[in-house]
């Protein structure tokens, strides 16, 4: 099941997915906290709760994946960015990321966006392969 952001109660699940999906790469780096999420996403003037989704399943009490859309200042009016697509590693390779991506793509299209942009690290080979397999370059 895919659902949208429900408010502050979704902060902890968002952080849990983020921490599981993007572990601190070096000892001097710390895991994200609520203040990081608020700065990176929730406090941005273009952030909309209806453009942040969670994947859930009956088999697990917490969300297992997330994705968001975020327009960026200076972009063409028909472009929006995929922001923080992540799936808990224990739930990967089951179609969760694809379902989240399709949800975001449809919402972007319905809102009049005709270009989706995203960023990932080249070192994250699984992410690069996923996006390429779904038509992104």
Image: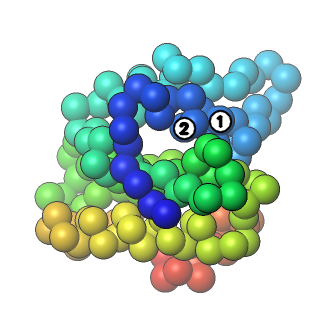
Q: Nearer the viewer, residue 63 or 61?
A: 61
107 shown above or below 71:
below
Q: Nearer the viewer, residue 8 or 110?
A: 8
| Residue under the point 72% across and 64% down | 92
The quadrant holding residue 132 is: bottom right
- The reply to whether residue 70 is in sight is yes
Left/right of residue 34 with respect to residue 128 in the rendered view: left
Residue 71 position, x and y percent, is 27, 49
Colour scheme shown: rainbow
16 shown above or below 98:
above
CA separation in Å, label 1 and label 2: 5 Å
Left/right of residue 59 with respect to residue 63 in the rendered view: right
Numbered tag placed on residue 16 in the rendering:
1
Residue 107 position, x and y percent, is 27, 65
**For the residue carrying disc 2, how many other residues have a C-alpha within 10 Å: few (<14), some (14-19), or many (20+)?**
many
Numbered tag placed on residue 77 in the rendering:
none
**For the residue carrying disc 1, how many other residues have a C-alpha within 10 Å: few (<14), some (14-19), or many (20+)?**
some
- The reply to whether residue 122 is in sight is no
108 shown above or below 34:
below
Q: Are marks 1 and 2 in contact (CB under 8 Å)?
A: yes
| Residue under the point 74% across and 23% down | 29
Numbered tag placed on residue 14 in the rendering:
2
Residue 28 position, x and y percent, is 79, 19
| Residue under the point 42% across and 73% down | 102
Left/right of residue 95 with respect to residue 20 in the rendered view: left
Tally of numbered tags: 2
At numbered mark 1, what does the secondary structure look like: helix, strand or loop? helix
At numbered mark 2, what does the secondary structure look like: helix, strand or loop? helix
Q: Residue furthest front?
A: 58
| Residue under the point 41% across and 26% down | 8
């Amino acid at each position: 099941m895919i659902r949208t952001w429900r408010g502050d109660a979704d902060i902890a699940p968002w952080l849990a997915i983020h921490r599981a999906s993007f572990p601190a790469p070096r000892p001097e780096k710390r895991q994200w906290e609520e203040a990081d999420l608020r700065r990176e996403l929730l406090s941005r003037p273009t952030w909309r709760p209806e453009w942040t989704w969670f994947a859930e399943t009956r088999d697990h009490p917490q969300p297992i994946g997330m994705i968001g859309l975020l327009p960026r200042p200076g972009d063409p009016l028909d472009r929006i960015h995929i922001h923080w697509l992540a799936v808990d590693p224990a739930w990967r390779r089951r179609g969760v990321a694809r379902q989240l991506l399709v949800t975001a793509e449809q919402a972007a299209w319905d809102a009049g966006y005709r270009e989706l942009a995203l960023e990932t690290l080249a070192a994250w080979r699984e992410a690069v392969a996923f996006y390429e397999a779904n038509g992104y370059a």
